[in-house]
Image (cartoon, rainbow, N blue to C red):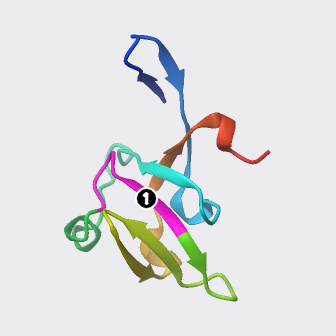
Amino acid sequence: MHRQDSSGATSARAAIPLRSLPVGRVARLAEPAPGDEIPSRLGDLGFTPGTELRIVRRAPFGDPVEVEIRGYRLCLRLEQLDGLVVEVDPQDVDA
């Protein structure tokens, strides 16, 4: 994906599944793929494209995860995050 910054230059942004976002990393929710949509329940909770969010922590076995979005935190099961993709700065993506 490419974004234009204030100077007019485009910068590539890496898209990864939300469920694989590392703890503490800030990302923006990406537009769903054509034919997909964000579940209405998550949309009601503020999961809209372009919204910043981060994984605060994961339970000992990885599920559920605590997500911070729009100034509040909530715990969600990984299955609820299936299909959601986030954009992160490529310089921040772990190799």
Q: Residue reaching furthest top?
A: 8
The amino acid on which the numbered mark 1 sits, given as a three-letter code, is: Leu
Quadrant location of the C terminus in the rendered image: top right
Q: Is residue 89 above or below residue 84?
A: above
Q: Quadrant of residue 69?
A: bottom left
Q: Position of residue 36 (x, y in %)?
A: 33, 53
Q: Is residue 73 left or right of residue 2?
A: left
Is residue 16 or residue 83 the one in the foreground? 16
Residue under the point 33% across and 45% down:
50
Residue marked by disc 1: 53
Q: Secondary structure at mark 1?
A: strand
Q: Is residue 33 above or below residue 46?
A: above
Magenta span of residues: 47-55
Is residue 44 or residue 69 the one in the foreground? 69
Residue under the point 54% across and 72% down:
56
Is residue 63 or residue 25 the one in the foreground? 25
